[in-house]
Amino acid sequence: MSFYFPPDKVLEEKAKAKLRKILLWRSFIERWEPVSKELQWIIGGRPNEEQHHKILPDYCYNILDLYKRTIFKGYTTISEAIVIKDKERAATCNTIKEAKEIMTIDWEKLGQVFAIGERATMFFENEAEQKLKQDSLLDLTPAQDDDIYNLVFGDRWAEKQCAEIQSADPNKPLEEIIERRLFAIEETTKKAVPDWHQKALEWDAEAVTKFHKGVSKGSAAFLDKDGELTGETKIKLRDTYEFILISWPEIDEMVKAKPAKTRNHLWDWLRPFSYARWIELQDLEQLNRLCNEIKLRLKSPGAPRKSK
C-alpha cells in the first residue's frame, strides 16, 4: 500500500494541472498518432524493417512489442491470411477456381482478422457510450466540451486534418466527408464475416470449418464480453506504460538533453502523477527497474563526480 493512499484531492488537482499544461503544448492526438502508427507496424510483423524510419524513442518500441505479445496476441494481418502468388491475375480474378490457382488462404487466420474487427465495431456501437456515461464524459457543459477538444485534438492538428480531408473532395462539406468515410468503414467491417463465410462455402467444406474456428478465436482474443481488453491482465504496469507512451516528446527531450538527464529527472517529472495514483510507480527504485526492462536510456542516478 502506498504512503499516499487514499488519493488526495489536492494531489489529483496538481496532476490535472500538469497534464493540462502538457496537452496544451502538444495535444493528445499529436502524441498518440505516431504511437498508433508504429503499433500497427509492430503488430503487423515489422514489414520492411530495414527501410522503416522509426518516429518514436527506442523505449516505445519495447512497450509496443509487449502489447503485441499480450493485448494483440490474437491479431493477424490480411497479408498473413491471404498470400497472393500472381498479383496481375488477382486483379482480374472472378471465380473461386481462378482464386485457388493464384492465392492460398489460411481460413482460420482470416476468420480471426474479421472477428476482431467486428468485435471492435460492436464495442464502439454498444458499449463505448455506456463507458463514457460511467466516466461522466457525456454530461459536460459547452465550455468543458471545448476544453476537452483542445486537449485531445488542438487547433494545429485539427486544421491540418481538415485541409487534408477536404483537399480530396473540395466540393463537399467537411462534415459530410467525415460521416461518409466513417459509415463506409463501419459497413465494410459489418459485412466482412458474412461475405467471407459465403466465399468459404464456395471454396470447400474444410474452409468453412476453419473460418468459423478463427471467428470464434478472434471474437475472444481482443475484447471480452464486457468490452475489456483480454490481454490487459498480463500487463502489470499498464497505466504507467500508457502514460510514458503519450509522454514520449518530454522523455525524448530528456534522453537527448545536454548535459544528459538522469532517471531522477524523470522521476521528479512523473512524481505528481504517481502521487495522484494515475500510474503504478511509487518510487525511484520501481522506475529504475522499469527503465531497465524497457531499455529507457537515461543515465542511472549515481554518486557525484569527484573534482580533479
Image (tube, grey):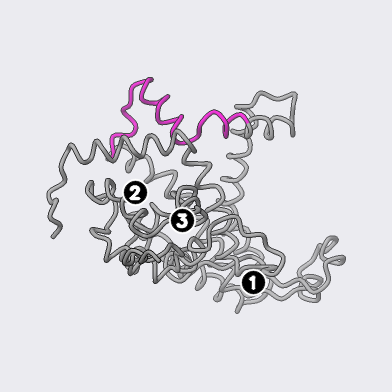
Q: Residue at x 62, y 42 (%)?
A: 184
Split into 4 quadrants, where in the image is the C terminus? bottom left
The image position of residue 140, as x and y in percent, is 33, 26
Q: Residue at x 52, y 71 (%)?
A: 214
Query: Label 2: which residue?
Result: 269
* Badge 3 vs badge 2, beta-carbon distance below 8 Å: no
Magenta residues (range) = 135-159
The image position of residue 3, as x and y in percent, is 12, 55
* Mark 2: amino acid: Trp
Q: Residue at x 56, y 61 (%)?
A: 114
Q: Is residue 155 magenta?
A: yes
Q: Give the CA separation, mark 3 to mark 2.
A: 38 Å
Query: Label 3: which residue?
Result: 119
Q: Give the CA separation, mark 1 to mark 3.
A: 20 Å
Split into 4 quadrants, where in the image is the N terminus? bottom left
Q: In terms of sequence position, does the residue under pointer 1 or pointer 3 come before the other?
A: 1
Up the image or down, 147 lies above or below 218; here it is above
Between residue 183 and residue 262, name the one nearer to us. 262
* Mark 3: amino acid: Arg
In which quarter of the view is residue 14 placed?
Answer: top left
Q: In terms of sequence position, does the residue under pointer 3 or pointer 2 come before the other?
A: 3
Helix, strand or loop at mark 1: helix
Q: In terms of sequence position, does the residue under pointer 1 or pointer 2 come before the other?
A: 1
Up the image or down, 31 lies above or below 256; here it is above
Between residue 153 and residue 228, name the one nearer to us. 153
In which quarter of the view is residue 39 placed?
Answer: bottom right
